Image (cartoon, rainbow, N blue to C red):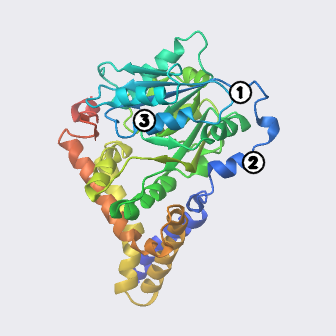
């Protein structure tokens, strides 16, 4: 009886995830379908397209910055578009590559490359670079109406900006963000990257993010189009200056000012590669413990939840008998059903969803590693910086 009762718990969890969590697993919140729903009346009139300025924080991004800048300069956008690149004390040719890309497009008048200053206390590196770019825009005689915060490894299709603006205008979104297509070439990426997208959607159901009546808020840092005045009213980037998970912090900040939108995109993609398991581990470990608010209690709860949700179903299926085995098999089947749409988005077979328990176990180990790195004073490591707050500072 006890075994049967325990086996029912993961089954109930997966029934809830399937039916009661905003249908996150269907991957329906997408930029292409959202644009199709925008009426002509919601679009700016001819000659009335707003000014947009892109801010790109770049630290040692020589491999990708040229492609990113070039893709922005090739946008099929009728309004004015300029770019500010903040070279965040790079030790490679990031600034040179950015300027060369602008010259190659004969658009050097629209692109400004500035050298970032020293990181002040209380700021994370990326947010400080973004703030420096935003300050330049704020001081212009005609500041832009929208600011596009983009990572230096993102490549956009020519219609991306027009599509983002259409979605923003449709319901006066103060923040419009895209979860871009992540690189998925190596074996490690093929097995683990789709799960990263799945877990993110489960944590922040996009339909709830996009519903002004729901408190859930999030954004994807690689591509965020913000209304400048709304951001200013919210307190600007300074209001989230110490956030390690800066995109979701900004999403929460902006949703207090008005509706926001977050969706998947196949037309904007990341060039950043994670060729080995260790690369993905470091990517996850950078912020996983910050997501848990640096709480050992939340960490323990998360591990128990991951074991219950992902590991118990296959264990009951393979080693239990009777009702417990049936409950485990159904829960595992629901797991496969939920994960399959994300796998299809990345061109993976739905059958590989059977491996989700093992993948979840790896992500759980990455989360523990994130906590260990924090306790050792090496939390939030990214681009040669340790950015997580010190333990003493947290307790103060």
Quadrant housing residue 26: bottom right
Q: Nearer the viewer, residue 97 or 375?
A: 97
> Is disc 3 in contact with disc 2, using a CB cutoff of under 8 Å?
no
In this rendering, the answer to whether 325 lies above or below 142 is below
Count residues near mark 2 (Cα–Cα under 10 Å), then give few for <14, some for 14-19, many for 20+: few
SS at circle 3: helix
Query: From where the camera sits, is residue 52 visible?
Result: yes
- In this figure, which residue is indicated by the disc labeled 2? 37
Cα gap from disc 1 to disc 3, whole angstroms: 26 Å
SS at circle 2: loop
Quadrant housing residue 318: bottom left
Count residues near mark 1 (Cα–Cα under 10 Å), then give few for <14, some for 14-19, many for 20+: some
Return the disc, 2 or 1, that comes first in the chain's sequence.
Answer: 2
Q: Nearer the viewer, residue 146 or 184?
A: 184
**Mark 2, mark 1: which one is toward the viewer?**
1
**Mark 1, mark 3: which one is toward the viewer?**
3
Indicate the quadrant containing the N terminus: top left, top right, bottom left or bottom right.
bottom left
**At which x and y percent is residue 327?**
47, 81
Q: Decide if residue 295 is on the left or right side of residue 265.
A: left
> Is disc 2 in contact with disc 1, using a CB cutoff of under 8 Å?
no
Q: Could you tell me which residue is drawn at 60 percent across and 49 percent down?
A: 208
- In this figure, which residue is indicated by the disc labeled 1? 49
Cα gap from disc 3 to disc 2, whole angstroms: 33 Å
Return the disc, 3 or 2, that comes first in the chain's sequence.
Answer: 2
Q: Could you tell me which residue is drawn at 61 percent across and 29 percent down?
A: 257
Q: Decide if residue 167 is on the left or right side of residue 326.
A: right
**At which x and y percent is residue 333?**
50, 77
Residue 305's disc number:
none
- In this figure, which residue is indicated by the disc labeled 3? 66
């Amino acid at each position: 009886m006890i075994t049967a009762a325990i086996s029912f718990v993961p089954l109930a969890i997966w029934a809830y995830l399937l039916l009661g969590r905003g249908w996150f697993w269907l991957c329906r919140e997408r930029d292409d379908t959202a644009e199709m729903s925008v009426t002509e009346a919601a679009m700016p009139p001819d000659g009335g397209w707003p000014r947009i300025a892109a801010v790109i924080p770049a630290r040692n991004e020589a491999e990708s910055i040229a492609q990113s800048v070039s893709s922005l300069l090739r946008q099929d956008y009728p309004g004015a578009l300029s770019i500010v690149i903040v070279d965040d004390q790079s030790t490679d040719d990031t600034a040179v590559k950015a300027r060369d890309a602008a010259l190659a497009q004969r658009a050097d008048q629209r692109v400004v490359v500035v050298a970032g200053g020293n990181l002040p206390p209380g700021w994370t590196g990326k947010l400080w670079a973004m703030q420096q770019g935003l300050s330049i825009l704020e001081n212009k005689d005609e500041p832009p109406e929208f600011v596009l915060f983009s990572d230096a490894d993102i490549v956009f299709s020519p219609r991306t900006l027009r599509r983002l603006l259409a979605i923003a205008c449709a319901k006066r979104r103060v923040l419009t963000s895209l979860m871009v297509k992540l690189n998925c070439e190596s074996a490690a990426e093929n097995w683990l990257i789709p799960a990263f997208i799945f877990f993110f959607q489960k944590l922040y159901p996009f339909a709830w993010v996009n519903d002004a009546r729901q408190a859930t808020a999030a954004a994807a840092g690689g591509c965020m189009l913000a209304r400048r005045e709304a951001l200013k009213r919210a307190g600007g980037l300074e209001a989230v200056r110490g956030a390690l998970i800066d995109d979701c912090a900004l999403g929460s900040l902006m949703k207090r000012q008005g509706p926001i939108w977050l969706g998947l995109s196949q037309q904007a993609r990341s060039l950043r590669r994670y060729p080995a398991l260790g690369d993905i581990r470091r990517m996850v470990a950078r912020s996983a413990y910050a997501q848990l608010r640096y709480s050992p209690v939340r960490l323990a709860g998360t591990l128990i939840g991951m074991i219950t949700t992902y590991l118990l179903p296959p264990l009951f299926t393979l080693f239990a008998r009777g009702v417990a085995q049936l409950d485990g098999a159904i829960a595992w089947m629901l797991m496969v059903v939920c994960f399959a749409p994300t796998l299809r988005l990345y061109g993976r077979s739905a059958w590989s969803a059977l491996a989700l328990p093992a993948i979840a176990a790896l992500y759980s180990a990455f989360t523990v590693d994130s906590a260990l790195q924090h306790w050792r004073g090496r939390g939030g490591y990214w681009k040669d910086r340790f950015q997580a707050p010190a333990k003493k500072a947290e307790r103060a």
